[in-house]
Each structure stands twice: as structure tokens, then as C-alpha cells.
Image (cartoon, grey):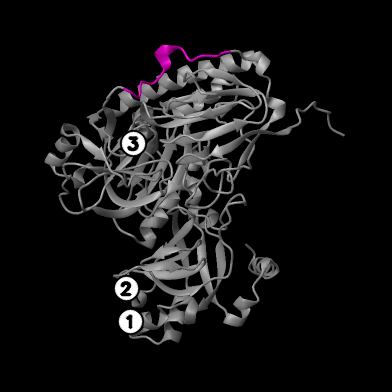
């Protein structure tokens, strides 16, 4: 694991410090973000309230009454890297059932055409690897994951869709995402998961944590139709998450 | 067998009824700060200072939920005797037709009518009720998030006919009589005051002119502003390269500048991640002043250093901490 000598520190107001890594979306850079988040967490710096990883940076929320900006930055700078701890500690694999294509994945056909693959190949490629959850974001625990196979990489749609169903599985550039509540999206919708990943009445509200992995598992539309809370429980017991 | 503790038992008590809801009246507390790690919007009172003070004035814990009233106030009928306090904007609050002061606890009796008139100044009033507002906590908070459809009363703004309950076991009005905030602590929302900003984090994305323009000219608060963000109109702030960044963490007070160059200040209901460059962040002690501006008003920004901003925050928290202590010794 790299040392953290190349990170940059910046204030976001007087109560948040941002740590920036390499300016790219990549598995390696995001792994560094998670690794550093863990390092800060374990160092138990007084006054640090929350550590929030994002794509290529992380936010340290702190209480300025307990610790000032300069002191916090100096303490963060003096942290030493922790080798391969992240591999041991982070990263549950969460198995997500997906119905690909058809009305659940209205863009699958177009994705296949534009990438020169068959629809089956797109499904095989998308579900053949597990993806790191780079961050949980937007308003309702959207897991931003990557990086997907280069062969599936397409820029976002030029005209966003007004309505993506709850549970939509979509791709854009080198990333894939689950959209946990009904909302508009500019990403390519290739499928839908019947699993309920987000529920504001449950604490925590999402089954995901940034730093976990998502593995998509194709299921038939028949299986999806019969999906209920019992099925969800059986699925989670089977895949142990 | 464990020890037997004497425990206060919560007692749900219907306290007030909404006769007219006003423009946008919602239940808000200090929000879901601890859930940002799960990608959850914080929400909460737009002007947390006024909300905290309102609670303290009626003997509540400062984190309790209050009613946030926007521009056009509601008409409320009290179902039970109790104690309230109104803070923040002056929307001509009246009890049974008589003007009542802000920043002061006020006894109300069963059958009393609270209503509001014209806006004198500010944008949002806060109504705290002794005993706190009895709605379930969603992710540790009673705050309404209309976009998400959760929190407060069924995730929506208040409507005609809604009743609000309090925890009756916490209501003991005899212990608090006409508590008043010392005038020197009252925030003056009437005065046209500059809002202070810490520059960055994406300062290098802006031209030198843009950084000067931000502080030189006033910006108008657009009609499209809401609890998620204030869209500003004024001299466009020009970028060196482009307006987009790889999405990173954002918080209330962040000043995002998209490609149009017209800034957007993120507010309480903002998303937790954003992909536009940020030229600066409004400091914590000045957010209430911005939240009290309404569409059509102008805001002028002023640069401040981080050490000074932290000193001001500390000073504010010390004052609030003293006020809270007074509260608990009295109750």
C-alpha cells in the first residue's frame, strides 16, 4: 500500500477538512481513500466526528472547539500508512440479484449495440466481477461503484430519463450504480434489483457501506415477481450479509 | 435482577391544531448529521441558532424539534395550556390578535389562537413548544425531508387539520415564567449585514477576477431558492478550466459555481455529494443570516480566515452552553 505523502488538505468551511487524493476515478485511488479513512478512524484524534469517503477525497468533520484546522492537518499529516490492513478489515461482498434487460433494463439493448456486444455478453461482463463501493452519495444512499470493464464504458445519456424505478441498476463511464428510490437519471439503465437496499425507517438506512463490494447476480423475471421480504431474508442468509 | 430506576414516562398530549398551514410550515430539529456517511441529506432548521434559542426559552433541550414557518405564517389553535417561544424572522406574530414579542417565552391557554401577519423582516420564524414535538425519529432526527418523503409529520409540510402532540410529562410551565433572551444575544436580521465566507476548496478553479467579484458585488437571491439551495444572480464567476469536478463531499454553506457562473449556496436539505467547483463556504455563525434572506433580497459576501471563523463559532457555542446550563438548573 502506498504511503500518503501525496495527499492534499483543504478546508471546507470551519468544520470540515477535505483530504484530496489523485484527481481520477479509479479503484486504486478509491482504495487509498478508504485505507486512509480507516487510518484516521483508528488514530482516534480528539475532535474528529465523522470521516466520509468520496470518489477521490474524504471529508473529516470535526469540532473546532476541540481542535483547530492547523492542528488537525498536522496530526493527519503525521499519520503513518498501515500496509494492507484495509484488505483484512474492509470489504464485505454484498450479492445483489438483478433482472437484466426488458422493461427492467430499457437501455440494455442500446448498450449492447453501442459497445458491439450481445446483450448476454453485457450481462456476463457486468455480473462477472465484484465492484468496490467508492462512496454513498446524493440524497438517499446511492452506492457509486467501480470500476466496470472497459468494454462497457459509455458516457452518460445525452437526454436523461425522467424516471428510473426504485432499485434501478445503471452504468456510465467506468462506474455502476444502484438507484434506491425512484428518481431521474442520466445513466444507462440495464436492470433492476428487487432487493430493498434503502429504508429510512431502519438504522442504518442502507445495507451498503462505502468500502464494501457489490456482486451482481442475474435472476429471472419470474424470481423477481415472487420477491418478497421472506425471499429477501433467505437471500441475505444464503449470501451471508 | 437489575436496579430499579425511576423513569419519567412519556405522555403524549395533543397540544395544537393547524387551522391554516401557511406557505411552508415543517417540523425541523438540528438534522441527521451522523448519517451523512450513509449518503443521507442532513436537513434540519435552516437557521439553527434561532431554533436552539426558541427551545431554550421554553425549557426544552436545544436539540428538540420546532415548527419552521416560512414567509407566510400559519394560524394555530391551542388545544391545551402550555408555553411557546417564537424566534427568527419577524412575521408579525399575534396571540388572539395581540402582537407578541419574539425571543421570549409566552404562556398560552386552551383555545388561544396564534397567527401571523405581514413580514417585517427575515424569512423563517421558529415556534418552540414546551414539552417538545412528539413525532417519531427517522435516522435520529425529527426533521422533515419533503424530497425524501420522511421525517416530521409523514415527510410532508403541515396541512389544515393536523394536530401536533407534545410529551406532556415534560410540560411544567410553572417553573418557567417569561424567560427572555438578553438583547445583546439576539441576532439582528433586520440589518443588512455581510455574510462571511472562507475561500476554497476549489479556489484554483476560478479566475482572480471571480474571487474579487464574489466580494465586490451584491448577489440577488433567486425565486428558485429553497431549503436545498439558494440560487444567486449577479456578476458571473468565471472558471479557469471548467465547472465540473469529480463529486465530493458538500455541506450547508458551500458555494457551488456551475458553468453558468451563477453561484448556488447549499442549504439544509442539500445532497451530500456534488460535482461543481466550490469557491467558498459560508461560516457557521453567519448561516442564520443567509437563511433569513428571502427570494428577491440581496446578499453581500465578505472574506474571513479560518482561525477567526473558528473563534467566532467557539464564542457562539460558549454562550449557548451557558444558556443551556441555566435551563437545566431551573427545570
Residue B257 position within the rendered picture, expressed as x and y whole percent measured from the top left? 25, 47
Does B104 sit left or right of A159 as displayed?
right
Which secondary structure, mark 3?
loop
Are the two marked residues, 1 and 2, in contact with CB atoms closer than 8 angstroms?
Answer: yes
Q: Which residues are magenta?
A: B178-190
Asked whether B187 or A29 is in front, the reply is: B187
Marks 3 and 1, how far apart at CA: 49 Å
Question: Which residue: 19% across, 44% down?
Answer: B204
> Which image quadrant for residue B305?
top left
Number of marks in the image?
Answer: 3
Q: What secondary structure do most residues of the magenta stretch adopt?
A: loop
Image: B39 above or below B34 = below
Reading the image, the residue beneath label 2 is A154
Residue A160 position within the rendered picture, expressed as x and y whole percent measured from the top left? 34, 68
Question: Which residue: 48% across, 15% down?
Answer: B181
Does A27 sit left or right of B181 as displayed?
left
Reading the image, the residue beneath label 3 is B294
Q: Which mark is residue A127?
A: none
Image: A54 above or below B64 = below
Are the two marked residues, 3 and 1, in contact with CB atoms closer than 8 angstroms?
Answer: no
Q: Residue furthest right?
A: B1
Residue A1 seen by the camera: no
Q: Residues within 10 Å of mark 2 (few under 14, many from 20)?
A: some
Marks 3 and 2, how far apart at CA: 42 Å
Q: Quadrant of the N terminus of chain A?
A: bottom left
Asked whether B147 or B248 is in front, the reply is: B147
Residue B91 seen by the camera: yes
Asked whether A110 or B175 is in front, the reply is: B175
Reading the image, the residue beneath label 1 is A115
> Which image quadrant for residue B88?
top left
Task: Answer whether residue B182 is magenta in the image.
Answer: yes
Q: Quadrant of the C terminus of chain A?
A: bottom right
Amino acid at each position: 500500500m502506498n504511503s500518503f505523502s501525496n495527499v492534499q488538505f483543504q478546508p471546507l468551511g470551519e468544520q470540515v477538512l477535505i483530504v484530496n487524493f489523485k484527481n481520477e476515478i479509479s479503484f486504486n485511488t478509491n482504495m487509498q481513500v478508504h485505507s486512509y479513512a480507516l487510518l484516521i478512524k483508528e488514530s482516534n484524534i480528539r475532535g474528529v466526528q465523522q470521516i466520509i469517503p468520496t470518489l477521490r477525497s474524504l471529508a473529516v468533520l470535526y469540532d473546532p472547539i476541540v481542535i483547530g484546522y492547523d492542528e488537525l492537518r498536522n496530526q493527519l499529516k503525521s499519520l503513518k500508512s498501515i500496509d494492507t490492513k484495509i484488505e483484512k478489515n474492509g470489504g464485505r461482498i454484498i450479492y445483489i440479484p438483478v433482472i437484466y434487460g426488458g422493461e427492467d433494463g430499457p437501455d440494455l439493448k442500446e448498450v449492447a449495440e453501442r459497445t458491439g456486444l450481445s446483450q448476454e455478453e453485457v450481462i456476463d461482463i457486468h455480473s462477472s466481477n465484484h465492484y468496490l463501493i467508492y462512496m454513498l452519495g446524493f440524497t438517499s444512499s446511492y452506492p457509486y461503484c467501480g470500476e466496470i470493464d472497459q468494454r462497457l464504458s459509455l458516457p452518460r445519456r445525452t437526454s436523461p430519463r425522467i424516471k428510473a424505478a426504485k432499485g434501478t441498476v445503471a452504468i456510465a463511464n467506468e462506474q455502476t450504480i444502484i438507484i434506491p428510490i425512484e428518481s431521474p437519471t442520466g445513466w444507462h439503465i440495464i436492470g433492476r434489483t428487487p432487493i430493498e437496499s434503502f429504508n429510512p425507517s431502519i438504522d442504518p438506512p442502507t445495507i451498503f457501506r462505502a468500502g464494501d463490494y457489490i456482486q451482481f447476480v442475474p435472476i429471472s423475471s419470474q424470481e423477481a415477481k415472487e420477491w418478497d421480504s421472506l425471499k429477501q431474508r433467505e437471500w441475505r442468509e444464503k449470501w451471508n450479509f | 435482577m437489575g436496579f430499579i430506576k425511576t423513569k419519567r414516562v412519556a405522555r403524549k398530549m395533543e397540544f395544537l391544531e393547524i387551522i391554516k398551514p401557511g406557505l411552508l410550515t415543517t417540523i425541523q430539529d438540528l438534522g441527521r448529521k451522523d448519517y451523512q456517511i450513509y449518503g443521507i441529506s442532513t436537513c434540519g432548521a435552516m437557521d439553527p441558532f434561532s431554533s436552539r434559542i426558541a427551545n431554550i426559552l421554553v425549557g426544552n433541550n436545544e436539540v428538540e424539534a420546532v415548527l419552521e414557518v416560512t414567509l407566510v405564517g400559519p394560524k394555530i389553535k391551542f388545544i391545551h395550556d402550555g408555553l411557546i417561544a417564537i424566534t427568527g424572522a419577524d412575521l408579525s406574530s399575534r396571540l388572539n390578535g395581540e402582537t407578541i414579542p419574539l425571543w421570549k417565552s409566552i404562556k398560552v391557554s386552551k383555545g388561544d389562537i396564534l397567527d401571523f401577519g405581514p413580514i417585517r423582516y427575515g424569512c423563517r420564524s421558529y415556534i418552540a413548544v414546551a414539552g417538545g414535538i412528539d413525532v417519531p425519529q427517522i435516522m435520529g432526527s425529527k426533521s422533515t425531508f419533503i424530497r425524501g418523503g420522511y421525517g416530521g409529520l409523514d415527510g410532508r409540510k403541515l396541512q389544515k387539520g393536523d394536530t401536533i402532540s407534545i410529551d406532556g410529562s415534560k410540560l411544567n410551565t410553572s417553573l418557567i415564567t417569561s424567560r427572555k433572551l438578553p438583547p445583546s444575544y439576539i441576532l439582528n436580521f433586520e440589518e443588512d449585514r455581510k455574510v462571511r465566507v472562507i475561500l476554497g476548496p476549489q479556489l484554483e478553479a476560478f479566475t482572480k477576477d471571480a474571487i474579487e467579484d464574489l466580494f465586490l458585488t451584491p448577489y440577488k437571491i433567486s425565486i428558485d431558492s429553497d431549503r436545498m439551495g439558494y440560487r444567486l444572480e449577479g456578476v458571473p464567476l468565471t472558471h479557469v478550466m471548467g465547472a465540473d469536478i469529480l463529486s465530493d463531499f458538500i455541506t450547508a454553506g458551500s458555494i457551488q459555481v456551475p458553468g453558468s457562473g451563477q453561484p448556488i449556496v447549499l442549504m439544509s436539505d442539500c445532497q451530500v455529494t456534488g460535482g461543481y467547483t466550490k469557491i467558498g463556504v459560508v461560516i457557521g455563525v453567519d448561516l442564520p443570516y443567509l437563511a433569513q434572506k428571502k427570494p428577491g433580497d440581496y446578499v453581500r459576501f465578505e472574506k474571513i480566515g479560518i482561525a477567526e471563523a473558528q473563534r467566532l463559532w467557539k464564542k457562539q457555542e460558549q454562550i449557548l452552553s451557558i444558556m443551556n446550563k441555566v435551563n437545566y438548573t431551573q427545570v
